[in-house]
Image (cartoon, helix red, strand yellow):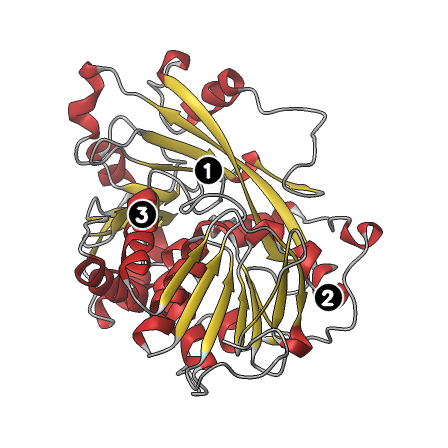
Amino acid sequence: MRGANGGRAGQDVHTLVVGGGVVGLLTAVECVRAGQHATVLERGPLPHPGNSSYDRHRVLRALHPHDPGATRAALTAHRLWRELEFLLDARFLYGTGVLTALPADETAAAAAGLAQAGHRAHTLGPHQLARTYRHLAFPAGLGAVVEADTGALLADRVLRAAVRWLRAHPRARLRPHATITAVDPAACAVTIEGGQVLRGDRVLLAAGAWSRALLPAAVAERLIVHRQTMLYCDLPPRERERWRDTPAVPASGIAWGAWLVPPVAGTPLKLSADALCRAVAGPGAPEPDQVDADAAASRFTELIPGLRPEWITGTRDCHYVTDGLRGGALLAELGEGAVLAHCACGGGAFKFAPLIARTLANRFGGGRPAPTGLRSLDHPVAAPAHRRATTSELTPQQETTHDRLQRQNVPQPRDGT
């Protein structure tokens, strides 16, 4: 690490990681495994229950309809998750299976593409889909591709295991309750609230929806902050048996983008939808109309006809950012490869996190990472670092319904309406 005067205190490369979410923690793990020193700086405790990464469970799927690059990347990430379970000595991947609803005439090609990549999947026609999952309802005319080996990631276990591993490693340092107020790409430095300046050889900004205040205006002004509401359900005893073999459903084909993660390993049934995602000015910004849990539960009866309001035991809002110009996540080079900002896109950042982390660590190590299939990761944006964005520049851009459906990979009618 560099001293206060900018000189090297030693010969080892030191990486500063701003943000203790899944991408920040796993990138620190990869940097340490590559022989670097890594310091993780987090505004709250580690892991932080208030971060968007912190949740009971997330979907790990391979199939991304109409996006073969993302599908290839997801299969690579699946393999890396298995490796991480061994490295971190924790189980967090559960093979519930994943069901993606698609127009019936598209399922065979989608399943064949997965099979060619060595991933097990089978198809269900509309009648088979209705008979197999009688407690769920899908739009008429849709079939499904069901993946056998993917499923749910226990997100909170991932974060706790990564923190435990880093805390025990001599080349890693954890700095909880260290709020970063500024990033200086030219000096590879960050300023902690209170005035302390830390300098390293590499800096990763992985602060999620809290990134915009730390980024140059050229990057900050293109980011949209989203607030997503999740509903958590405790199933009554009479319902639990039928849900025992229910796969995760990241794309139900319902026009407003309903999706679910089934209960597994003591977790609740989790529900959310594209309709419960909205652009906001920032993580702490108020909203004139709050999401009503009872009203949302009533709407979800379109997917789960037997759902009752009393099943809902809690709700949670999480925040993430998307690139308003290209959609999805954004990777920006702020300091000629020595300072990177990874601005994440919802649950996608979690399922791809091991692949993202390895790619970022490779970039920091001076290597040329192999193509991942993820556009944002393979083609980072080079951005000037001359100033920070002002409040007026942080007004969220408008995202169309079509854009949201594309981002969530919700199957759409062929005419695009």
Q: Where does the image place residue 307, in percent across and percent down from the top left?
A: 36, 19
The amino acid marked with disc number 2 is: Pro
Question: Toward the viewer: 66 or 45?
Answer: 45
Q: Where does the image place residue 182, in percent across and percent down from the top left?
A: 68, 60
Mark nearer the viewer, 2 or 3: 3
For marks 1 and 2 on the same chain, the one whose residue lies earlier in the sequence: 2
Tell me: residue 331, above or below residue 298: below
The amino acid marked with disc number 1 is: Ile
Mark nearer the viewer, 1 or 2: 2
Question: Toward the viewer: 349 or 53?
Answer: 53
Q: Which residue is mark 1?
A: 254
Judging from the image, what secondary structure is the residue with disc 3 in?
Answer: helix
| Residue 216 - label | 2
Judging from the image, what secondary structure is the residue with disc 1 in?
Answer: loop
Relative to 50, is 252 on the left or the right? left
Question: Toward the viewer: 102 or 388?
Answer: 388
Question: Toward the viewer: 319 or 48?
Answer: 48
Q: Where does the image place residue 336, in percent across and percent down from the top left?
A: 62, 83
Judging from the image, what secondary structure is the residue with disc 2 in?
Answer: loop
Relative to 246, is 178 on the left or the right? right
For marks 1 and 3 on the same chain, the one whose residue lies earlier in the sequence: 3
User: Based on the displayed image, in which of its 4 quarters is residue 113 positioned?
Assistant: bottom left
User: Based on the displayed image, in which of its 4 quarters is residue 386 positioned?
Assistant: bottom right
Mark 2 vs mark 3, CA separation in Å: 32 Å
Q: Residues within 10 Å of mark 3 (few under 14, many from 20)?
A: some
Residue at 42% of width from left, 57% of height from top? 174
Mark 1 vs mark 3, CA separation in Å: 35 Å
Q: Which residue is mark 3?
A: 160
The amino acid marked with disc number 3 is: Arg
User: Based on the displayed image, in which of its 4 quarters is residue 324 positioned?
Assistant: bottom right
